[in-house]
Image (tube, rainbow, N blue to C red):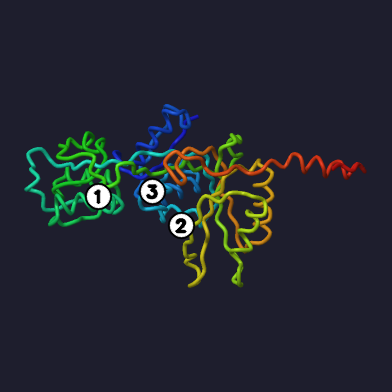
């Protein structure tokens, strides 16, 4: 049976590179069918409707932080679930049509994230160009090929696909920049626990004093390590927020399961986004996902002994 993956297009984006990497790693079949879309939200919606099997979307940049469109799309509609992650190194090239010199460039296009990640280089090299925002870096390269703009900042592959010439490469301000991508499906059994996993969720707490602290105590009292928290407006009522939380550990870790159960009881809204093997950075490129949850085996054996009428030290 064929598998279809949706992702931000056209070809030549960093998201396409993530799809190719996921395929090479065996997380997508070699004959996976590609479907390009105009946004991460559109890719996730195709998963919800069943039009594709899986979406590949950007989750977080090591330079600019969360990809807010992806975060917001997780909170609406039918539940969906993250099953894998992968870091893609982010390096930009300056692409032009053959025969274009640096002095000829009057207009420059790329995704706004790429624009922010090359600020120092642009200020020194192309201070007077007019910026034209693109829906993706691949789309920016296509616009150059079509003669709509003079130059694009994009992955080298986008230049190859559009028969463009590279005038400069490696021009991102931070040389070790990365973006974390995830594969997303309809809810399913999570990938098996590896001992170095992440779990993600979205929660909304009651509108009362210390409510976020009370929610996070469900993690703290069980020594579950929170690796990331972000707030996003709900768009339902001014002053209300969804909190996107990632923790170290897996649903099959008893401490994590108990913490999630406590959050489910306490929060006004709670959405589980999945547990999956850690690959990307947290607090450093390819660093550990955080301190893994404590082992509850000893305490559970102690409780079982009490139920049998036995007292153990």
Q: Count residues near mark 3 (Cα–Cα under 10 Å), then give few for <14, some for 14-19, many for 20+.
A: some
Above or below, 287 against 241 in this view is above
Tell me the quadrant of the picture where the C terminus can be found. Answer: top right
Question: At 88% from the left edge and 45% from the top edge, which residue is drawn?
Answer: 306
Tag 3's secondary structure? strand
What label sits on residue 61 in the rendered view?
3
Asked if the residue at tag 2 contacts the one at tag 3, i.e. Cβ–Cβ closer than 8 Å, the answer is no
Distance between mark 3 and mark 1 Cα atoms:
14 Å
Query: Residue at label 2?
Result: 72
Query: Residue at label 1?
Result: 118
The answer to which image quadrant residue 221 occupies is: bottom right
Tag 2's secondary structure? helix
The picture places residue 233, in percent across and down from the top left corner, at 47, 65
Asked if the residue at tag 2 contacts the one at tag 1, i.e. Cβ–Cβ closer than 8 Å, the answer is no
Mark 3 vs mark 2: in front:
3
Question: At 15% from the left edge and 37% from the top edge, which residue is drawn?
Answer: 165
Above or below, 101 against 120 in this view is above
The picture places residue 235, in percent across and down from the top left corner, at 47, 66
Q: Count residues near mark 2 (Cα–Cα under 10 Å), then give few for <14, some for 14-19, many for 20+.
A: some
Question: At 89% from the left edge and 43% from the top edge, which residue is drawn?
Answer: 311
Of labels 3 and 2, earlier in sequence is: 3
The picture places residue 49, in percent across and down from the top left corner, at 49, 48
Question: Seen from this angle, which residue lies furthest right?
Answer: 309
Tag 1's secondary structure? loop
Distance between mark 1 and mark 2 Cα atoms:
26 Å
Above or below, 178 against 111 in this view is above
């Amino acid at each position: 049976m064929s598998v279809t993956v949706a992702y931000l297009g056209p070809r030549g984006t960093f998201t396409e590179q993530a799809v190719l990497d996921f395929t090479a790693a065996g997380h997508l079949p070699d004959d996976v069918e590609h479907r390009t879309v105009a946004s991460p939200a559109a890719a996730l919606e195709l998963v919800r409707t069943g039009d594709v099997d899986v979406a590949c979307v950007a989750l977080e940049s090591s330079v600019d932080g969360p990809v807010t469109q992806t975060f917001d799309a997780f909170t609406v509609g039918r539940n969906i679930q993250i099953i894998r992650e992968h870091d893609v190194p982010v390096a930009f090239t300056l692409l032009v049509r053959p025969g274009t010199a640096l002095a000829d460039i009057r207009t420059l296009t790329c995704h706004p994230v790429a624009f922010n990640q090359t600020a120092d280089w642009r200020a020194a090299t192309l201070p007077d160009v007019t910026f034209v925002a693109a829906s993706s870096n691949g789309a920016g390269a296509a616009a150059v090929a079509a003669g709509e703009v003079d130059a694009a900042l994009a992955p080298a592959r986008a230049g190859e696909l559009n028969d463009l010439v590279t005038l400069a490469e490696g021009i991102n301000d931070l040389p070790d920049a990365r973006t974390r991508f995830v594969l997303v499906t309809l809810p399913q059994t999570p990938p098996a626990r590896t001992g170095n996993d992440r779990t993600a969720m979205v929660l909304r707490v009651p509108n009362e004093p210390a409510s976020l602290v009370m929610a996070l105590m469900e993690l703290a009292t069980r020594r579950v390590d929170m690796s990331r928290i972000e707030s996003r407006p709900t768009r339902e009522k001014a002053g209300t927020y969804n909190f996107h939380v990632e923790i170290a550990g897996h649903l099959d870790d008893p401490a994590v399961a108990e913490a999630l159960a406590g959050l489910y009881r306490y929060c006004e809204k709670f959405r589980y986004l999945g547990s999956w093997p850690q690959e990307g950075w947290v607090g450093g490129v390819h660093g550990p996902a955080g301190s893994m949850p404590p082992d509850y085996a000893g305490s559970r054996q102690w409780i079982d002994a009490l139920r049998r009428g036995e007292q153990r030290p």
